[in-house]
Amino acid sequence: MHLVELLKRRPVPAAAVFLALTRRCPLSCRHCSTASEPDAEQQSGALLRRFVAGFSRADHPEFLLLTGGEPLLRPSLVHTLATTARAAGTRSYLLTGAFFARGGTTPPTVRSALRAVDHVAVSLDVFHEEYVPRHQVFRVLHELLADGRDASIQACGNGSDDPYLTELTEQVRREFGDRVPMLVGTVQPVGRAREWSPDGGTHGHGTGGEGAGGEGTGGEDRSGHGTGHLPVQGLLRAAPCDLAAWPVVGFDGTITACCNQDTLDERPVAGHLRLGHVGSTTWPQVRRRVTTTPVLRALRTYGPLQLAQRHLAAPARPDTGSGPGAAALDFLDSLDYCGTCRSLAGAPDALRRIEADGSRPSAALLEQQAIALQSQSGPVGFARRHGAATRAGLVLLGGTGPAEGAA
């Protein structure tokens, strides 16, 4: 399963589900979006196995993404989840920090888990290299390729022009002959990186294992959408959220419709983003809620900024007597893209209006058009929106087409 097969489906609601197997990790990388620790919390394996066992040939996600923390601290669980999912027709993806590579050999239980999944992504950046030598990560990647596994590298740097990324990219392409794709993002002020990285006022998406830019990575504007402050006839331009599509089973079992780390960490979860709990909610229920909930449909069609301007109560402009007033625009300016979405939880009247809009007969058609436009840009378009834009073409390495923009 090549990386592009995953990314091209990223805007499609319920095409995949993330499972955060553990928040534990033996590494303490300075950029970790989840601020994972060796003794952090993790969800019951029995609950996760029961959830995945609820996949059926008739109703299953296309992809199961196994994340952490470090999911390979639970190799037997990884093996069971991947094989159970495959029996239902679901392919699996795993992101690892390759902590085990430090020993020079891959433990048998870990290797068995790696062979069970359809795609293995390995985090490789200046932060991970403080703990795991690059040549040992390359050894693991060579093993994966020899075993017939599809593999990729998830890297991040301090901006697209980081010299480290240039050097890393060149070596990876030489070492593997352009057989290993790379998803490249930039460090975001979230998790441990919040203590030292510049705060641009927004926080990156990702669970620490997000296949579209986790481990504290994200796009240059962090939301992947910009601020959205481009008015069209007095209304902010629509900036659809293409990440409120794949549900996430968090570290405590709470299931959210969003992979933004602040959303995953915040308790209680914003009501319009909460889908249930892994202990009491089945996959068919999650899929139905993701695909049919009117508020989520509206977020995927317009984005939170335009919805907030449309539906949050605001004083009229003094010059026209209509439209959002300065107070409302100042409020929007004070929030980032994802923060605006979470703020809707405190505005029940606005949520009711958004729900009404998302329930209209035309709403499903408009959502389909928004998803189609995002899908047309393909895997490179998604990587450009949510990663280091100038390196987006690296996701195509090892595929059938040219690695556009990979230089």
Image (spheres, helix red, strand yellow):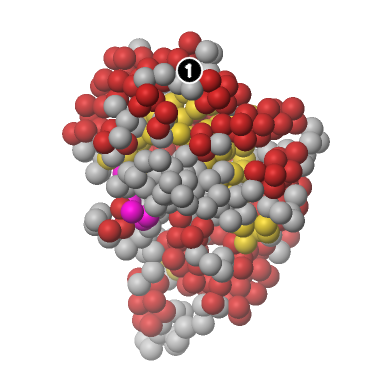
- Asked if residue 260 is among those painted magenta in the image, a careful observer would answer no
Residue 211 appears at what percent x and percent y? 48, 38
Residue bearing mark 1: 144
**If the image is split into quadrants, where does the C terminus sit?**
top left
Position of the N terminus, as image quadrant, is top right
* Residue 298 visible in rendering: no
In the rendered structure, the answer to whether residue 22 lies left or right of residue 200 reads right
Question: Amino acid under label 1?
Answer: Leu
Residue at image location 37% in from the left, 20% down from the top: 104
Q: Which residues are magenta?
A: 186-192
| Residue 196 image-quadrant placement | bottom left
How dense is the environment of label 1, judged by Cα within 10 Å: few (below 14), some, or many (20 and up)?
some
Q: Which residue is rendered at x = 41% and y = 19% of the image?
A: 105
- Give the residue furthest to the right: 58
Give the vertical position of 103 relative to 256 (above or below): above
Q: Give me the residue at 53% from left, 13% from top.
A: 148
Residue 305 lies left or right of residue 326; in this view the side is: right
